[in-house]
Every structure is written in structure tokens, then in C-alpha cells.
Amino acid sequence: MYDIVIVGGGPAGLTAAVYGLRAGKSVVVIEKNGFGGQIAYSPKEENIPGTQQISGAEFADRLTEQAMALGADMELETVTGLKKAETGFLVFTEDGAEFEGKTVILALGVRHR
């Protein structure tokens, strides 16, 4: 059982993972496409504190590497369901995997329009 199951591996989900890990929690991040989210496709980002300019892909890579270095488990899976369990929550995936967590953070991001 994880302390935190995070559904979504974009900047919000990865940032939540970093802060959870720094607080000593066990964390798994489940992402369906690729870690970093839509920002990875941005050629230039200029509104990230402490950084003058960075490509979205580089920012996504750095954030992913930071979460992994702190001990996050990273899973490429499509989440299909969530169920309240006696001790927390169960998160189900398309491939039949189940992840149990005391807490679930939904960091589902946005869809390009």
C-alpha cells in the first residue's frame, strides 16, 4: 500500500509526488501517455520560478528525474477506475493492475483543444 497514489504525470502530479516524497511518504505516479504532460510539447517556457527560459521537454524531464531520484514509483498505465476501500482507495488500470493507497491525488491535466 502506498501513502499516496497520484493519477497524472504532468507538472501538477509530479510536483505533488516531490512534496509527498519530501514528507517521507511512499508515492506512485500513474500516467497514461508520457511523464511531463502537455508542457513537454512546449518549445519555450518562461513563467517557471527560478528559471529564465527552458524548453517544456527539458522541464518535464527534470521534474520526472527529480521525482524518481526521491523514490517515486512511476507507472505507465491507463487508469480505468477508483474505488473507496476499507483502508483507503483502490485504483484500477486498463491492464488489470491495482494500486492501493491511503490517499489519491487526481492530477488529470487538460486536453489540447
Image (cartoon, rainbow, N blue to C red):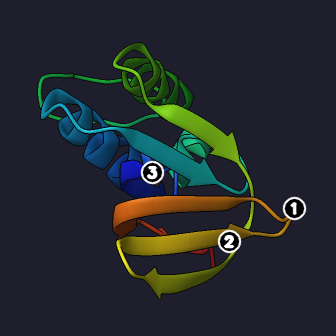
Q: Is residue 51 left or right of residue 83?
A: left
| Residue linked to disc 3 | 1
Whole-percent x and y of residue 68? 46, 21
User: Is 81 placed above or below 11 here?
Assistant: below
Q: Along the line of sight, which residue is nearer the eye, 69 or 64?
A: 69
Whole-percent x and y of residue 27? 39, 42
Q: Amino acid at mark 3?
A: Met
Question: Does dot 2 land on a helix, a strand or a loop?
Answer: strand
Question: Does dot 1 land on a helix, a strand or a loop?
Answer: loop
What residue lies at 56% left-to-right and 29% top-to-bottom?
57
Whole-percent x and y of residue 97? 76, 59
| Residue linked to disc 2 | 92
Q: Nearer the viewer, mark 2 or mark 3?
A: 3
| Residue linked to disc 1 | 95
Spatial separation of the CA atoms under disc 2 and disc 3 = 14 Å
Instruction: Give neighbour class at mark 2: few <14, some 14-19, many 20+ (Cα, 10 Å).
Output: some
**Is there CB contact under 8 Å for labels 2 and 3?**
no
Instruction: Give neighbour class at mark 1: few <14, some 14-19, many 20+ (Cα, 10 Å).
Output: few
What residue lies at 68% left-to-right and 71% top-to-bottom?
92
Whole-percent x and y of residue 106? 41, 71
